[in-house]
Image: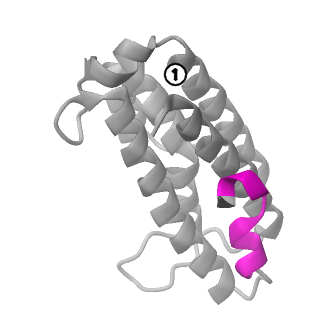
Amino acid sequence: MKKEDFVKELQFLHKNLSHYLTYWPAGKEVWKPAENSFSLLELACHLYHLPGDYALILGGKLKELEEKSTGEREEKGADDLRAVLDYGMAALFSAMASLSDEEWETKRFPCPFYPSATAKKHLFQLITHMHHHRGQFHLYLKQLGQPVDTETVYYGQTEEQFS
């Protein structure tokens, strides 16, 4: 995949995850599908913080990432989550744009969660990670009675992305 393909997929996820927040069930933030699961808010915080977390990885700010990941989340609902997503995506796109094509393919970036990898590999990991948690989030919303459906899953995807 080329850098442009990653950008298109991240743009889709940005638009799609922002749309998912229109289904946010206020007052259900602590709801869990099972006792040993994340709450709705915990899952959403993890998902919506991912782009910013990976921007820190590509920016070499691992200490900041470590401090962020051990702290309390301040988000309380849809507006806070949307702001975190918007900020994180902007930071991620900036970090991606700062890399030359050669750096994109060859420069290795350390990560506290798995072995160092190229930016390309990190972004592939990010996208698959986000799709995984988006599926969980979709299921949580469905279990809470929100009208999410197949159309919601593809909201924001262009015809070009389908081909």
Q: Main secondary structure of the magenta part?
A: helix
Q: So how many labels did they put on this image?
A: 1
Q: Residues within 10 Å of mark 1 (few under 14, many from 20)?
A: many
Q: Magenta region: which residues?
A: 149-161
Toward the front, the furthest residue is: 163
Residue 24: give x, y in percent of width and height.
Answer: 76, 67
Residue 151 lies in the magenta stretch = yes
Residue 50: give x, y in percent of width and height.
Answer: 49, 43
Q: In this figure, which residue is indicated by the disc labeled 1?
A: 96
Query: In which quarter of the view is residue 97 placed?
Result: top right
- Residue drawn at (46%, 65%) of the image: 132
Report whether 32 appears left or right of 17.
left
Task: Give the image's coloring scheme.
Answer: one colour
- Residue drawn at (68%, 42%) of the image: 11
The amino acid type found where label 1 is placed reads Met
Work out whether residue 140 can be spotted: yes
